[in-house]
Amino acid sequence: MTLSEDTAQWRRMGRAIRFLSEHYLDQPRLEEAADVAGLSPFHFQREFSRYVGVSPKSFVGHLTLGHAKAELAQGASVLDAALDAGLSGPSRLHDLCLKIEAMTPGDYAKGGKGVVIDYGFHVSPFGTALVMATGKGVCGLGFGDEGAEEEMLADMKARWPKAGYCENAARTEKSARQIFDPKRYGGNLPLHLMGTPWQMKVWEALLMIPSGKLVTYHTIAKKLRAPKASRAVGTAVGRNPISWLIPCHRVLGSNGALTGYHWGIVRKRAMLAVEAARKDQRPSTSLMA
């Protein structure tokens, strides 16, 4: 795993995020999180804000997801506007295949045969990240705990069982930096989506959800003109191969509750808290109480 000289610090922030996400109901003190990270409270406060993009206090404040139900209504209206701009039309899906997916449904059905995928493991705020890329762009992004690399790789390989795989962390490191740097967050990073036509529709709908906004599975189903297909939407969301960048974590149950997330509910809660805190971020010098 690599992110050059930043590796140790990314790991510290990842441990702290995991700790805070698991113990937020206890309102942990700054000193406790700093101890988990192996830093003094002063340095932890500074480094957390630098690497995660928000203060520890702001992050903890958003872990309760108390804003979720209010955001769901706004998220629905945002998705309305995006879909009305043309997502549901067949020509839009065709354009998507040409510009991003690049594989015909027939090619996809072959299990990725003929496709070469480079991969590498990298540290991230959400644990170990597996970044995968073809010659056309990032095709996979998964998460796990340190030591679970083999399981993560097997999970992602199962999506394209006949593709060729080559460990090449030197190549995927640049993408990892762009993905997790809070000042860049993806940017113009090219994506290479490989899925069925239905999955592609659902994944593009996910891309229409702005950071800090939330929608339900049912909302996506309705906007895709398949109001009874909430379960099918949920299945497609669960098969999203590029987590975080294609924000499946922004989809909640109809009552605003966190539901199953392929890479773990604790991780989903952390992702939502980071995004909400970044959106609401205001200058502050205070520490956690």
Image (cartoon, rainbow, N blue to C red):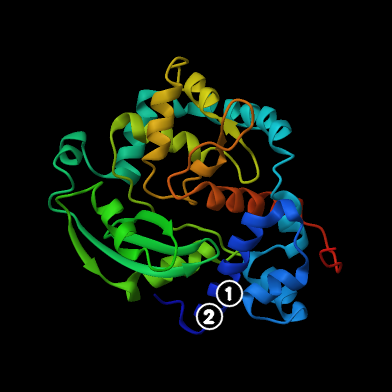
Q: Residue 261 in the image: x percent, y percent?
A: 47, 43
Name the secondary structure under disc 1.
helix
Residue type, label 2: Ala
Residue furthest top as drawn = 228
Residue where numbered disc 2 is placed: 8
Q: Residue 125 in the image: x percent, y percent?
A: 55, 64
CB-based contact (under 8 Å), mark 1 and mark 2? yes
Q: Residue 284 in the image: x percent, y percent?
A: 85, 64
Residue where numbered disc 1 is placed: 12
Front-lying residue, 138 or 156: 156
Q: Residue at x 72, y 70 (%)?
A: 32
Is 65 displayed left or right of 178 in the figure? right
Q: Residue at x 51, y 22 (%)?
A: 223
Which quadrant is the C terminus positioned in? Answer: bottom right
Is 64 displayed left or right of 175 in the figure? right
Quarter of the rendering containing residue 256: top right
